[in-house]
Amino acid sequence: MILRCKAALANTKGSAVPLTVAITLALLLLFTGISEYFRLMLIAQGVRDTLQTAVIAVVNDNYDDVYHSVREGYSGAYRPVAETFEESLDYSDIYALMDDTLGLTYDNGYYVQYTSQGEVEYRLWGLDVDIENAPISSGDIASQRFVVDSTLKLEVPVSFGGTLLPSMTITLKTSAGYTPRF
């Protein structure tokens, strides 16, 4: 009986099969994890770039009042009223600008992108836009910068190994502006 056990243990035919299967499954698991990570980062980068483009459009919408022909000097978005100037800001609709690019659907307070199977790919909400108008010209060009800062919440459902994990929720921040150069 002992000789039989020694012979069975000494026989190494087929012993690499379980190891090969284990390595293959580990690599497959690693590959799916990396693929999901890249999917999340690709969605976040695409939404952030679209938000940045929309914020730049808001900056461009305000450009027409920055160099008004009635006055001299450089300053923010103001328009002449009687003997003074008043602030004249164009806020635009950033969600509408993003919708044109991303094809979003408004649903229960969220702007949602659906997959072709009708599942939620990601959700956007909580847009906050802060426009900092440059002051009336003081002669200091460095302090005169028209800036639009924005933040937006992004939620992307995470699926790994066929199970739904907690969603990735991040805050995207962008900023755009201009400074007169002459």
Image (cartoon, grey):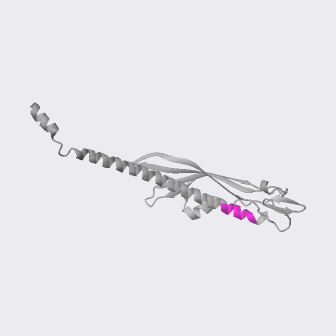
Q: Is residue 1 above or below residue 157?
A: above
Q: Is residue 176 left or right of residue 139?
A: left
Q: How many marks?
A: 0
Task: Name the spot of residue 123 as percent of width and height, x first.
Answer: 54, 53
* Front-most of residues 42 and 112: 42
Task: Name the spot of residue 147 as percent of width and height, x first.
Answer: 72, 56
Task: Name the spot of residue 7 as percent of width and height, x first.
Answer: 12, 37
* Front-most of residues 14 and 66: 14
- What residue sits 45% from the left and 58% below the top? 118
Q: Quadrant of the C terminus?
A: bottom right
Q: Is residue 57 magenta?
A: yes
Q: Is residue 67 left or right of residue 40?
A: right
Q: Is residue 164 left or right of residue 101?
A: left
What segment is highlighted magenta in the picture? 56-63
Q: Is residue 140 magenta?
A: no
- What residue sits 17% from the left and 45% below the top? 13
Question: Residue 7, can we see it?
Answer: yes
Q: Quadrant of the N terminus?
A: top left
* Front-most of residues 99 and 28: 28
Task: Name the spot of residue 4 as percent of width and height, x first.
Answer: 10, 35
Residue most toward the bottom?
69
Q: Quadrant of residue 181?
A: bottom right
Helix, strand or loop: magenta stretch? helix
Residue most toward the right?
83
* Front-most of residues 40 and 109: 40
- What residue sits 55% from the left and 56% below the top? 45
Residue most toward the front?
10
- What residue sits 70% from the left and 61% below the top? 59
Question: Residue 96, can we see it?
Answer: no
